[in-house]
Image: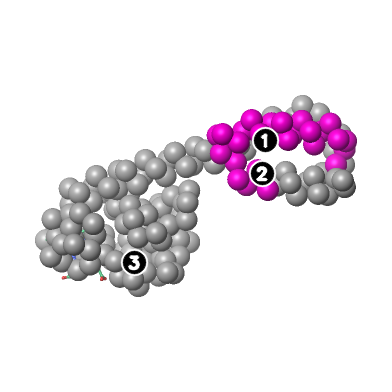
Amino acid sequence: MGSRRVCLARVYYERRNTLKRRFVLASLAILVFAIGPGCGGAAPTATPRLQQTKEAVVPATAQHALQEQITAGMQAYDQFCDRCHGPNLTDGSAAKLSKAALAKYATAQGLFDYVAATMPKGNPGGLSEQEYYDIISYLLFKQELLEPGQAVDENTAGDVLLSQ
Ligand code: HEC
């Protein structure tokens, strides 16, 4: 087995890390370093293993933050949007917030701009910026327009594309 393949295997596992996989990753890291100086010719030391552990924790934290955002968005939606747009987004008296309707806005930022400027109808701009981003996150999650682990905030929303 060439060291290049070992490198690719490491990259693959690092990308797919979850808390559960941290143990698998740790074993893999030990294996990689036991096999020899692969991956850029670095000699096996304790430092790369520490870095890997850190990388394994970061995506798990991001996932947690996203779930909190979706939950906060759901609560804000129930409070401010539900009565017109309905509990399932498409079953209210007002416009249906279907996948196609949301996708028209091209990016999460485009949707944010529209919603923050016009909704809730009768009280446009009445929510905090954070509440609007949370609601957008919830809407996109519900209509399967959000990549897993994607947070929606002022830094990321312009890059969240809403293609169906
Ligand atoms: C009082 C009723 C009412 C409330 C509350 C309300 N909306 Fe609306 N919404 C409407 C109506 C009516 C429309 C159709 C466009 C218009 O009349 O401005 C609409 C349109 C929309 C659209 C555009 C849909 C499209 O097809 O382009 C979005 C997105 C939207 N609302 C999101 C929200 C969100 C998010 C909230 C909560 C923060 C909210 N609305 C609260 C009545 C409401």
| Residue 60 image position (x, y, % from top left) | 52, 38
| Residue identified by numbered label 1 | 25
Is 33 in front, or is 1? 1
Residue 102 vertical placement versus 16 (above, below): below
Q: Secondary structure at mark 2?
A: helix
Number of residues whose C-alpha sits closer than 10 Å to that of mark 1, classed few (under 14), some (14–19) or many (20 or more): many
| Residue 56 image position (x, y, % from top left) | 61, 36
- Residue at 40% over, 52% down: 153
Using the rendered image of the protein, determine whether residue 117 is visible from the camera's viewpoint: no
Amino acid under label 1?
Leu
Amino acid under label 3?
Lys
| Residue identified by numbered label 3 | 99
Could you tell whether 105 is left or right of 91 in the image?
Answer: right
> Which quadrant: the C terminus?
bottom left
| Residue identified by numbered label 2 | 13
Q: CA distance from mark 3 to mark 2?
A: 32 Å
| Residue 51 image position (x, y, % from top left) | 68, 34
Number of residues whose C-alpha sits closer than 10 Å to that of mark 2, classed few (under 14), some (14–19) or many (20 or more): some
Determine whether label 3 and label 2 are within 8 Å by CB.
Answer: no
Query: Residue 58, located in which quarter of the rendered image?
Result: top right
Query: Residue 110, located in which quarter of the rendered image?
Result: bottom left
- Residue at 35% over, 47% down: 70
Determine whether label 2 and label 1 are within 8 Å by CB.
Answer: yes
Could you tell whether 18 is left or right of 159 in the image?
Answer: right
Specify whether residue 15 is painted magenta. Answer: yes
Q: Which residues are magenta?
A: 12-38
Could you tell whether 112 is left or right of 7 in the image?
Answer: left
Of mark 2 and mark 1, the one earlier in the sequence is: 2
In which quadrant of this rendering is ligand 1 seen? bottom left
| Residue 120 image position (x, y, % from top left) | 18, 58
Main SS category, magenta section: helix
Using the rendered image of the protein, determine whether residue 22 is visible from the camera's viewpoint: yes
